[in-house]
Image: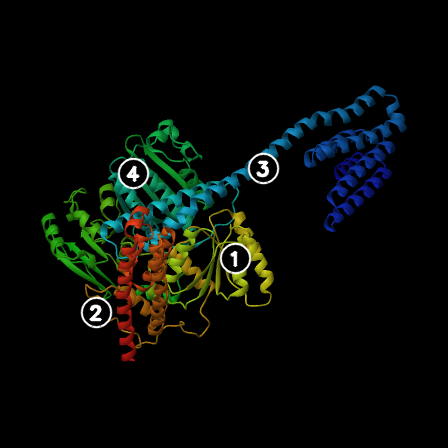
């Protein structure tokens, strides 16, 4: 207020006394601003500012009543400003102070004595206008409070939904991952795989809800990583293939030449956009095909990446093509009934496109289909000289199906030429060729045009996981024909140079479905996880979660201890030594956050114990609470096998210069006995071999000894429970034997006890004793083979 009034005074030539008063006023305001930095309470500053404004207004109008009469407007401005900034309480306080100030001016200044009616009206206005505005401020305050409460309720709802849905998914995904490693029949393996993919899809839908809610407030920088577009396209295809096959839709992928370059950018956002767009395309396509394609182009302002999803579905009316990008909006009211969906996918894609600085567009015709295209800036990864040299020396095998042999001046690529001049020659060549041996199959365009896109011949390339590459007769090497794009992974010129051929090979390798680096730990056998055994404390009140973590950790050689609540976890930390702690955030008695905070105080200067928080609450607030309590990281349930293994490797690194603890020296591993491969063996030779690779002879002998001691007592417990007709104790003992049998590779015993741990009461009461005897006999066979195996190893040593 003071600065504005001082400028007006200077422009209108007001007396130096008024200007001096304003100088003092501004100096006092400067002191108040300094008090803000020195810790002066806000309420004291606000009161002082109101009184200073009222005093300055009165002094200026008394010294120059005529010229400073405009100060009334500034006084009203100050009153309303206090109200809108701080609320009605400060509105009325400022109005009262200004009314007293103006009343003093009217009382002592002859200027206002000649205009008593105007003076009274202005004084009343100082009181009545703020009183009227107070109702507006009250409504605005209530609306703000309601919006804040609604935002809190939304956050609480999302946290609750996330927690309740993720908790059962933790068991489903965890056990599915472990089951996929077992020697299952093809039919059962397919069922487990479908269940796993369905659980992953449900998890993806949960993430969609969280993305939609967070995007309103999270506008910070995005995390970047290196990726290639063909890799993301292939991952999207692999996730959505079951969904497409269920509807009888063909799902094809295609990459433009040169699209194999490594890009540095938000890979997760790009992948999520592809998943959303392709999933929508499959959902709205009743028959036909869906094509996912990608490429890199040169725009006027630099390189840009693009990808598109094209379908032969229902299409979108022109008037709805922009509306569909709004949250919870469908193209028309019938869409929800016919196809379902949340209406969030395209809204999330548009938000991601905006955050990445790109553009998402749609071309569609009702009854024909739709094409969604994203274009955005691309930044390439700069390769070091070593990486370039490695890329230049990569080798590959190629099968060429054409009328003229493909020229190859580089010995690193082996090209097997199968002469073909027509479709019959192509079919004959494919019958004699082993397609799965090749990275790509190059097919001459002249021959490809002789084969219909619906011909079963193309299915052979899909089944062999060998992408077909079109050898274009045109130098431009471009695929405009949708039929050709559906059949071929990419295209090369008629006489490709080394770069074009290498690009096609890399695209083909991506489309073959080689697991990405992030998934290697997910799929790696336990014997390939080279890490010393660790003592792990798992604190979780959910038994299923504990069993999942135990299964994963014990499968890679770690020792697991359990705690079912916070107090038990804290007691275990005080009495035992652990290498790492997996702590559930929500536990009875003491929460995981409280346990971590207390332990950080107790451990003092000792070696900092890695503590990882596990929670089904995926909100940022919970993550921050975990970090504030002293946790090293927060992981969201379900925690996948690969994610858990990488966390163990990150937070429990091998001591520098040490070798894997317990691992046998090369050449001293105990050989798997030949007898184990016979049909009458009760031990799984693959499991025994994995245990040997994991820790060597001593580790396996120790494991066998522990198994024999544990199972001997458990058999006694099982027989006692059977004789005394105690069903719960019988099931518990059977479960314990099953767990021990699984660790040692006794697959028959594990299967038998797995059935008994869920035995029905009538069968138990009728056959419990005989079943216990069967378990005892099977366990004896296992023990005999283990003894023979370890005795042979000792004699060999």
Q: 10 Å neighbourhood of mark 1: few (<14), some, or many (≥20)? A: some
Q: CA distance from mark 2 to mark 4?
A: 56 Å
Q: Nearer the viewer, mark 1 or mark 3?
A: 1
Report the front residue among 610 and 456: 610
Report the front residue among 194 and 371: 194
Residue 592: percent from left, percent from top = 53, 54
Look at mark 4 in the image and give the residue it sits on.
311
Look at mark 1 in the image and give the residue it sits on.
568
- Quadrant the N terminus occupies: top right
For residue 148, which numbered disc appears in the image? 3
Instruction: Confirm or deny contact between disc 4 and disc 1 (CB under 8 A).
Output: no
Q: CA distance from mark 3 to mark 4?
A: 42 Å
* Label 4 secondary element: strand
Please tell me in which quadrant of the rendered image residue 393 appears. Answer: bottom left
* Label 3 secondary element: helix
Whether residue 380 appears in this view of the structure is no
- State which tag comes first along the sequence, 2 or 4: 4
Look at mark 2 in the image and give the residue it sits on.
675
Please tell me in which quadrant of the rendered image residue 599 appears. Answer: bottom right
* Label 1 secondary element: helix
Q: CA distance from mark 2 to mark 3?
A: 71 Å
Report the front residue among 689 and 448: 689
Report the front residue among 92 and 306: 92
Residue furthest to the top: 117
Residue at image position (29%, 73%) is 790
Residue 162: percent from left, percent from top = 46, 44
Q: Nearer the viewer, mark 2 or mark 3?
A: 2
């Amino acid at each position: 207020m003071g600065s504005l009034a001082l400028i007006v005074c200077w422009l209108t030539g007001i007396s130096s006394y008024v200007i001096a008063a304003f100088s003092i006023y501004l100096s006092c305001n400067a002191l108040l601003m300094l008090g803000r930095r020195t810790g002066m309470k806000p309420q004291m500053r606000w009161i002082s500012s109101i009184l200073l404004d009222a005093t300055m207004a009165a002094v200026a109008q008394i010294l120059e009543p005529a010229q400073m009469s405009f100060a009334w407007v500034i006084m009203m401005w100050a009153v309303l400003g206090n109200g809108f900034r701080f609320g009605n309480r400060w509105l009325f306080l400022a109005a009262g102070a200004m009314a007293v100030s103006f009343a003093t001016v009217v009382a002592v200044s002859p200027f206002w004595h000649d205009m008593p009616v105007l003076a009274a009206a202005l004084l009343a206005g100082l009181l009545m206008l703020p009183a009227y505005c107070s109702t507006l401020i009250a409504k605005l305050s209530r609306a703000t409070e309601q919006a804040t409460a609604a935002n809190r309720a939304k956050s609480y709802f999302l946290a609750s939904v996330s927690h309740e849905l993720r908790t059962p998914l933790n068991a489903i995904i965890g056990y599915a991952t472990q089951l996929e490693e077992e020697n299952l029949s093809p039919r059962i393996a397919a069922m487990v795989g479908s269940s796993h993919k369905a659980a992953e899809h449900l998890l993806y839908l949960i993430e969609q809800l969280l993305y939609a809610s967070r995007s309103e407030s999270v506008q910070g920088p995005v995390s970047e990583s290196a990726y290639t577009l063909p890799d993301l396209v292939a991952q999207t295809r692999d996730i959505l293939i079951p969904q497409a096959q269920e509807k009888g839709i063909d799902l094809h992928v295609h990459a433009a030449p040169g699209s194999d370059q490594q890009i540095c950018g938000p890979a997760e956002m790009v992948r999520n956009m592809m998943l959303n767009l392709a999933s929508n395309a499959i959902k709205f396509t009743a028959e036909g095909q869906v094509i996912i394609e990608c490429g890199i182009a040169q725009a006027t302002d630099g390189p840009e990446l693009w990808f598109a999803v094209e379908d032969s579905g229902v299409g979108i009316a022109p008037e709805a093509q922009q509306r569909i990008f709004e949250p919870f909006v469908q193209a028309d009211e019938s869409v929800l009934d016919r196809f379902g969906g949340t209406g969030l996918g395209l809204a999330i894609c548009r938000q991601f496109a905006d955050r990445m600085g790109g553009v998402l567009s749609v071309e569609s015709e009702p009854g024909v289909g739709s094409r969604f295209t994203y274009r955005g800036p691309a930044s390439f990864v700069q390769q070091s000289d070593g990486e370039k040299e490695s890329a230049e020396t990569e080798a590959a095998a190629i099968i060429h199906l054409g009328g003229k042999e493909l020229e190859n001046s580089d010995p690193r690529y082996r090209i097997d030429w199968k002469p073909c001049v027509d479709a019959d020659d192509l079919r004959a060549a494919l019958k004699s060729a082993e397609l799965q041996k090749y990275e790509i199959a190059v097919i001459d365009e002249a021959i490809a045009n002789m084969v219909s896109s619906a011909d079963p011949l193309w299915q052979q390339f899909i089944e062999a996981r060998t992408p077909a590459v079109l050898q274009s007769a045109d130098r431009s090497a471009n695929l405009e024909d949708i039929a050709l794009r559906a059949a071929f992974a990419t295209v090369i010129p008629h006489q490709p140079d080394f770069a074009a051929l290498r690009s096609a090979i890399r695209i083909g390798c991506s489309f073959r479905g080689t697991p990405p680096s992030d998934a290697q730990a997910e799929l790696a056998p336990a014997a390939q996880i080279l890490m010393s055994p660790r003592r792990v404390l798992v604190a979780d009140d959910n038994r299923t979660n504990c069993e999942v973590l135990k299964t994963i950790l014990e499968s890679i050689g770690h020792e697991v201890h359990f705690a079912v609540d916070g107090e038990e976890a804290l007691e275990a930390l005080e009495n035992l030594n652990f290498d790492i702690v997996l702590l559930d955030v929500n536990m009875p008695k003491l929460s995981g956050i409280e346990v971590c905070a207390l332990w950080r105080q107790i451990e003092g200067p000792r070696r900092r114990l890695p503590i990882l928080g596990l929670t089904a609450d995926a909100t940022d607030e919970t993550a921050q609470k975990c970090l504030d309590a002293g946790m090293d990281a927060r992981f969201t349930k379900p925690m996948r096998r690969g994610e858990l293994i990488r966390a163990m490797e990150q937070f429990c690194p091998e001591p520098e210069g040490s070798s894997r603890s317990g691992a046998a020296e090369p050449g001293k591993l105990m050989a798997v006995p030949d007898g184990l491969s016979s049909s009458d063996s009760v031990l799984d030779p693959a499991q025994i071999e994995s245990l040997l690779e994991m820790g060597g002879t001593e580790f396996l002998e120790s494991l066998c000894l522990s198994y024999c001691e544990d199972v001997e007592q458990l058999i006694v417990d099982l027989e006692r429970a059977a004789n005394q007709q105690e069903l719960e104790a019988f099931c518990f003992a059977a479960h314990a034997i099953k767990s021990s049998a699984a660790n040692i590779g006794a697959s028959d015993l594990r299967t038998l006890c797995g059935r008994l741990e869920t035995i029905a009461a009538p069968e138990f009461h009728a056959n419990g004793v005989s079943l216990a005897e069967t378990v005892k006999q099977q366990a004896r066979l296992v023990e005999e083979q283990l003894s023979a195996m370890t005795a042979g190893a000792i004699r060999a040593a």
